[in-house]
Image (cartoon, rainbow, N blue to C red):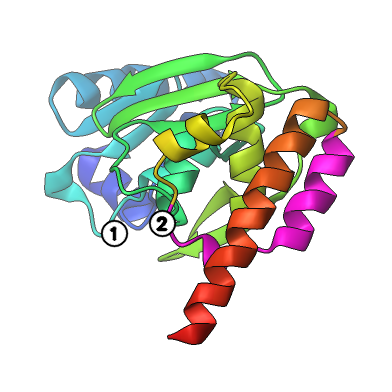
Amino acid sequence: MEFEEFLKKVSKLAVIEAEALYSGTAKRASVEVQLSRWHKAGKLIQLKRGLYVLSETYRKTEIYGLAVAAVLHRPSYLSLEKALEFHNLIPEQVAAYTSVTSNRPAVFKTGLGDFKYTHIQKSFFWGYTAATLNGQTAFVALPEKALLDFFYLRHGPATEAYIDELRLQNLEDLDEKRLIQFAKKMNKPKLFRVAEQLKQRIIAKKRLEKKK
């Protein structure tokens, strides 16, 4: 296959999965050789074995790291620091795409950025939604679940002082009832304590906003 023919097939795709290009075992090896050559020539960026994106010169669609994160390591959803940034709950910009997975933990350093996957037990793998970005699908934790995932997996203390250190913002956008419901479902005393403290802050912020 010539690169021009390849471009016609994949130019509108955000992520190119080599598996989708195979049309039989006889062709598999030749496809892998071609992809490797195009990667070495700078025409493709390899995210991991069998997964590529077009280099910027050849792209016809913008690539969203949030959507790439969903494909790079399955099953997973964006959570922790990057999800808190996505929901505008923290003032900092987070460089790495942080996700949770019920699979093995993993880290991928790619030309699109760093993608980090933290293991979470299967019984806690919920509380996320699909977001569509220019036709690309990302899976992102609901803001309340992102907070609980953070306190569960990052092992921060359930104290007012630690919550202050996080410099949380826009708390009025959170659903305190859902936060408590999620904490009860996770059934961890520490998370319930955190949820109760955050609930009071959310209620106070909503009251303050009403007075404006």
Q: Quadrant of residue 194?
A: top right
Question: Which structural element holds mark 2?
Answer: loop
In this orientation, does residue 157 appear? yes
Mark in the foreground, 1 or 2: 2
Tag count: 2
Going by the image, does 208 lie left or right of 144? left
Residue at 42% x, 85% y is 212
Residue at 29% x, 59% y is 61
The residue where tag 2 is placed is 88
Q: Quadrant of residue 160?
A: top right
Q: Relative to the observer, which residue lies in front, 145 or 114?
A: 145
- Percent across and percent down for residue 5 are 28, 47
- Percent across and percent down for residue 139 are 59, 49
Residue 56 within the magenta-colored segment of the rendering:
no
- Percent across and percent down for residue 130 are 62, 57
The residue where tag 1 is placed is 61
Q: Relative to the observer, which residue lies in front, 28 or 80?
A: 80
Residue at 45% x, 23% y is 116
Question: Which amino acid does the dot numbered 1 rest on?
Answer: Thr
Q: Quadrant of residue 164?
A: top left
Question: Which amino acid does the dot numbered 2 rest on?
Answer: Asn
Q: Relative to the observer, which residue lies in front, 31 or 26?
A: 31
In this orientation, does residue 125 appear? no
Residue 181 within the magenta-colored segment of the rendering:
yes
- Magenta residues (range): 169-186
Badge 1 density bin: few <14, some 14–19, many ≥20, Cα 10 Å: some
